[in-house]
Amino acid sequence: MSTKVPIVENVLKINDEMALQNHQLFQNAGVFVVDLIGAPGAGKTALLELTLRRLWNTVNIGVIVGDPATCRDGDRLARHSDHIVQVNTGSGCHLDANQVRHAMDKLALKDLDILIIENVGNLICPVSFNLGQHCKIGMFSVSEGDDKAAKHPNLVISADLLILNKIDLLPYIPFDLEHFRQDVRHLNRTAPLLEVSVAKDQAAEWIDWLTTKVQQSNNT
Amino acid sequence: MHEVSIAQSLIELIRRYVPAHCRLLRATVRIGPMHALEPEAMRLAWTIATTEVGWAGAKLDIESPPWRLRCAACGRCWAPGRVDEACTCGCTNVEIMGGDEFQLDSIEVDTPVVPDRQKRVTSNRTRLHNTETGARHEHQSSNC
Ligand SMILES: Nc1nc2c(ncn2[C@@H]2O[C@H](COP(=O)(O)OP(=O)(O)OP(=O)(O)O)[C@@H](O)[C@H]2O)c(=O)[nH]1
Ligand SMILES: [Mg+2]
Ligand SMILES: [Zn+2]
Ligand SMILES: [Zn+2]
């Protein structure tokens, strides 16, 4: 004898519940939180180094950075801010809401205006695991090839902002920029697409986007 | 291999619904192509995750609804091969209507062998019904 039990719940409901609690804590502390998602080596940490350098005297930025192993990204970022927490996920290929909760406990959230969560380098599952963030950012780079947005629709569809990094490499690598833009537009008509070169210090649009978002969230 | 953590999350959620002394026999999930799950990897992860919690042999039914798009210009709805397909009218402004499903639909549990004492008080079927499929679930199924 067996009994069928209807359920109809999101598979990641337990993570979502924890993410909601995180979100509430972020709201209470008045901190604007972004989840930065991109492939390994897209330039996530480099973008955050630039951001911390650029904004250190105007806003307080904390970073939670997830990597399978090492504290290398955390060490790089710690040169620019005291509010850095490195999380090692071992074989885990993404951060979940529970890991973020533990990392949050190590930060003085009340002192922060912005918290950036650099997810584990991976274009797939970080998208499904909510962390409690206000915005999701999808980051691609020229060296990965122009088909990566089309191949990862989930990230493009879910993102509030899309970044294409390493545009300084366009002259050296076959990369059809127009095609990439079309793929992105096709999947997501509302999220801005920022084309930047972190290495060349060309990311003014990103800094504008971030500071505008923080102001908006302070006003609401 | 995000299938591993998804299988573990699924088991964690299912544990909330499996009554004491019952074993999970089957779970039915509905997962759209948006989540890029590889069914074979998912089944392997499921086998490992169920065995770990003492539910070895529990089946996993994966329903895979296709992408569904709607054209903003002409209103046509269709199930495309690729999510970034344009409409036959030439319009590329299409809305995603389906394909993002990520849902645990139902589970099946065995009816446990209950000590005589308890059996007299209430039958398992009734207890299951009351605690697990009461007000919190809108979708009552007929065989419950
Ligand atoms: N040419 C070029 N190289 C860049 C640019 N931005 C970053 N890089 C280089 O790309 C490499 C990877 O950068 P990281 O910042 O470590 O990338 P990441 O996304 O944090 O990588 P993981 O944390 O390992 O996933 C480094 O060697 C950077 O110097 C850019 O705009 N142009
Ligand atoms: Mg990094
Ligand atoms: Zn993962
Ligand atoms: Zn049409």
Image (cartoon, coloured by chain):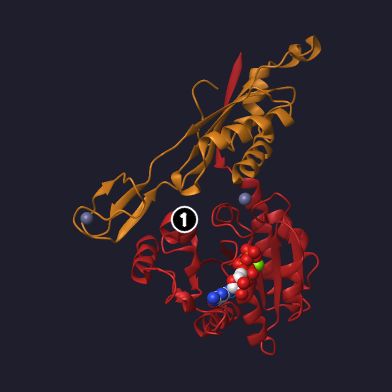
Chain colours: A red, B orange
| Quadrant in the picture for residue B106 | top right
In this picture, residue A28 sits left or right of residue A133: right
Reply above or below: B86 against A52: above
User: Residue A80 in the image: x percent, y percent?
Assistant: 73, 81
Q: Residue at x 64, y 29 (%)?
A: B47
Where's the C terminus of chain A, which quadrant?
bottom right
User: Residue A19 in the image: x percent, y percent?
Assistant: 65, 57
Residue A141, visible in the rendered structure: no
User: Residue B103 in the image: x percent, y percent?
Assistant: 53, 41
User: Residue B104 in the image: x percent, y percent?
Assistant: 55, 37
Reply above or below: A112 against A67: below
| Chain under disc 1 | A
> Regarding mark 1 in the picture, which secondary structure is present there?
loop
In this picture, residue B140 sits left or right of residue A23: left
Q: B96 and A24: which one is in front?
A: B96
Disc 1: residue Cβ within 8 A of ligand 3's nearest atom:
no
Q: Residue furthest bottom?
A: A57
Q: Residue at x 76, y 76 (%)?
A: A78
Q: Residue furthest left?
A: B89
In this picture, residue A172 sits left or right of residue B21: left
Q: A75 and B144: which one is in front?
A: A75
In the picture of the structure, the residue carrying the numbered disc 1 is A152
Three-letter amino acid code at the position of disc 1: His
Within 10 angstroms of label 1, few (less than 14), some, or many (20 or more) residues? some
Where's the N terminus of chain A, which quadrant?
top right
